[in-house]
Image: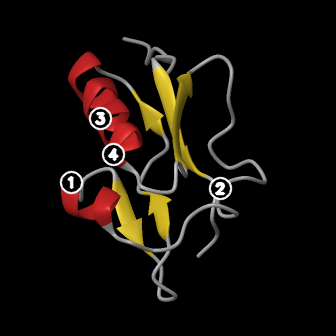
């Protein structure tokens, strides 16, 4: 049996220029976000594969007070692009 590549349904990323380290995203979904040593959010894994996880990520994005969390269609984004916060 051959392994099959599954494309991500969506990609979540955090704009490092906007993130102020409130920690709300990590509190809402520790499975999707973690905080760096400096206190800023980064995605645990930017690729989202199921509808429930995509809905959760969108809810977090809607609640982010700085608008730093973004959820994009999987074919339109690179979760490790320049907007993503580093460690």
Alpha carbon of mark 3 to alpha carbon of mark 4: how far? 6 Å
For label 1, the residue is 28
Q: Contact (CB < 8 A) between labels 3 and 4?
A: yes
Q: What is the secondary structure assignment of the residue under circle 3?
A: helix
- Number of the label disc, if any, that sits on residue 84: 2
Instruction: Return the x and y of residue 5 as percentages of the image width and height.
Output: 50, 18
Alpha carbon of mark 1 to alpha carbon of mark 3: how far? 9 Å
Instruction: Return the x and y of residue 51 as percentages of the image width and height.
Output: 27, 17
Counting residues from the N terminus, which is met first, the one under dot 2 or under dot 4? 4
**Residue at the limit of the structure toward the front, as seen here:** 65
Q: Contact (CB < 8 A) between labels 4 and 1?
A: yes
Alpha carbon of mark 2 to alpha carbon of mark 4: how far? 18 Å
Please state, as top left, top right, bottom left or bottom right, where the C terminus lies in the image: bottom right
For label 4, the crowd category at 10 Å Cα-Cα, with few meaning under 14, some 14 to 19 and many 20 or more, is some
For label 1, the crowd category at 10 Å Cα-Cα, with few meaning under 14, some 14 to 19 and many 20 or more, is some
Alpha carbon of mark 2 to alpha carbon of mark 3: how far? 19 Å
For label 3, the residue is 59
- Image: 37 above or below 55: below
Q: Which of pointers 2 and 3 indicates the residue nearer the eye?
A: 3
């Amino acid at each position: 049996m051959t392994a099959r590549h599954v494309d991500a349904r969506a990609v979540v990323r955090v704009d490092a220029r906007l993130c102020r380290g409130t920690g709300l995203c990590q509190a809402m979904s520790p499975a999707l976000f973690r905080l760096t040593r400096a206190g800023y959010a980064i995605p645990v894994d930017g690729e989202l594969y199921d509808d429930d996880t995509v809905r959760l990520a969108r809810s977090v994005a809607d609640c982010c007070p700085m608008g730093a969390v973004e959820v994009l269609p999987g074919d339109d984004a690179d979760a490790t692009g320049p907007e993503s916060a580093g460690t």
